[in-house]
Amino acid sequence: MTQIIAPRVRILVLLILAVAGALLAGAAPASAHAALTGSDPAQGAVVDTAPTRVSLTFSEPVAVGDDSVRVLNPKGERVDKGDPANPSGTTYSVPLVSGLPDGTYTVAYQVVSADSHPVAGAFTFSIGAPSETTVSVSAQASDDGLVGWLYGFGRYVSYAGFVVLAGGAAFVLACWAPGARVRAVQRLVVSGWLALTAATLGLLMLRGSYTTSGRVGDVFDLELLGDVLQTKTGAALVSRLLLLATAALFIAVLFGAYARTADAAPDHPGDGDGGEPDKRDLTFGLALGGTVVAAGLAASWAMSEHASQGLQAGVAMPVDVVHLLAVAAWLGGLTALLVALHRAPVETPVGHDAVRRFSRLAFGSVVTLAVTGVYQSWRQLGSWSAFTDTRYGQLLLAKIALVAVMVAVAFMSRRWTRRLADARGSAAAEEAERAEEEKQPAGTAPATASETSEAGKTEAGHDAVRAAQLARQRAATEAARQKRLRDADPNRFGLRRSVLAEAGVAVVLLAVTTVLTQTEPGRTEQDARAAAATSSSAPATGQGSGAVSLTMPFDTGGTNGKGVVSVDLDPAQAGDNALHVYVEGPDGTPVDVPEVKIALTLAAQDIGPLPVAPDRITTGHWSASGVQIPMAGDWKVEVTVRTSDIDQVTVSKNAQIG
């Protein structure tokens, strides 16, 4: 890298990478993309009888394992049995042991969302009444800690490697064919391939620990690696490695056969030679093959992350591929242009035509990013309020601001390009260079006859030390000469500075983009908040404020005396309430009984029982309006069901009113 980028560039890149690292480090705790939207029993609920199972509902499908859902009693002992089941849609349940005593129980879960990110959390519910518990309800996700940080850093390196690889190759093919023979550009593209390959291998090794234990020792667990290979994310990473093998062949041809056909004088194949058929065919083949490989690499992200889940996944995945290709063409091409402007030899300069071609390519990429970005934003946010109310929306605003800054700096680069085109005659710079060389002392002139003679004498005298010193002197002199030539044109110097600034913003933009891919979408975050608010205001167990639904089995002891009675009370507040009673048989069908009576009691205030006589509406349905509840509190709801002249039973449950 030190041979590719000038010291000033290296310092800026190091500073920007430090900022990017800080962004990545701060993003780890918010990497969940599926959210818990409901549970039965609900979070914080107090139920009268022990449930037979615990059910969790998520905002999207998740992957569960043997220990994905754990239910712990107040002593921290597990009371769940069997593996989690998926009875329907996004709901997952785990059975519980029978005969659970009263107390507070903790439900801890750790699953993997459909877009590849681990999701962890915990909540409590109580049987009978709350009690003290030795279990902490704060669940640490597997992506918190060193493994999570390494995984996030690997994702950043993989994105950066793809951008440099695809964008650098596109810059050579579409904008500056002689760049295929420039060592600095070759090193840049190869470095992108190496970074993407190493990061992909690292992600594959880290994946098992990242989604399970989070322990560093599990990174080398071959059993976990085997499990990862069976997942969608594992398949995507393996596919990426196979495509990178094809990309290596593409690079070999680009910097081999194609580089030999590229003329040094023109900026683009066909500018000076009319475009020989063999050369045109090779260029077309590389462009087509490179596009297919780059699209395949981009698809390895689209098929396993945000785009593969949620609304319109069939449209979102190809849109995501196009978005990534546009990012690579713009940012990767910009990086290649920066390296070329700083490190290209004098014999192969970056002409104004190449800069203009890249300007057009960058403009098309920005338009593509705007169109695809609007669609992605709508899909991930869902509302204007999500821009400011969610972390995803706030990061997206930061990304939009950075893009705006980049476009402004790019406009300055276009101005320098026009000035460079107006000053195509570089005779003044060449004359200044010749005058400068004439002023140099004879001992420092590059490759003079006296030096050649001296080198011959040194070789003849076997003076190896002097020969090495002479070689270093020549290299330093040549490097200084090339730098003076590059800096002689003020327009080219201004273009280099503006492109450097643009590239600096691009590195930060890439970091923010990486954080976005690890952040819960705004739409999901808002849905989870709404579900949590609904759960707290109207829990299914009948606790808390809002409409209350109570279900009680009954058995009068007579013929056809078994069934289930349900009582709905709305809005379960002090004052007027509507009450509905439903009676069903053991098979779930509505049944009529001779009589149903309701009584409400608030023992804490010595109120009641307050009788309620509902009217029959239809088979198995009774209703009463204007039921007066004098105050809020923990009310006992008693239901008396009579199935014959002599067979009746009274069942009851408590409900929090108000």
Image (tube, grey):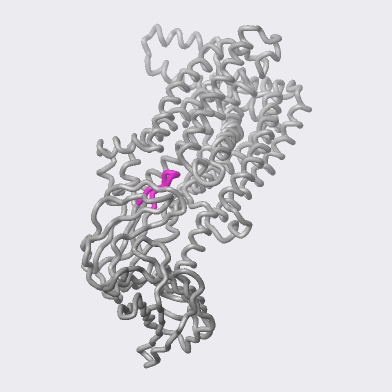
Q: Position of residue 24 (x, y in %)?
A: 45, 49
Q: In terms of depth relative to the viewer, which is nearer, 562 or 63?
A: 562
Q: Is residue 534 left or right of residue 146?
A: right
Report the residue that reaches farthest toward the front. 645
Query: Is residue 653 something that shows in the picture?
Result: no
Residue 183 appears left or right of 438: left
- In this rendering, the count of numbered labels is 0
Residue at 27% from the left image edge and 48% from the top image edge: 66
- Residue at 51 percent across and 24 percent down: it is 293
Q: Which residues are magenta?
A: 111-119
Residue 641, horizontal then vertical, whole percent: 36, 77
Q: Quadrant of residue 582?
A: bottom left
Vertical placement of residue 273 versus 553, above or below: above
Residue located at (51% from left, 15% from top): 253
**Closer to the camera, 427 or 594?**
594
Relative to 520, residue 360 above or below: above
Please name whichever residue, 201 or 127, is drawn nearer the observer in this view of the structure. 127
Q: Is residue 17 left or right of residue 99?
A: right
Can residue 476 be seen in this snapshot?
Answer: yes
Residue 510 horizontal/vertical position (percent) = 53, 42
Q: Is 608 included in the stretch rendered in magenta?
A: no
The residue furthest bottom is 606
Q: Which quarter of the figure has residue 129?
A: bottom left
Q: What is the x, y in percent for residue 378?
A: 61, 49
User: In the picture shown, does residue 491 fall above or below 450?
Assistant: below
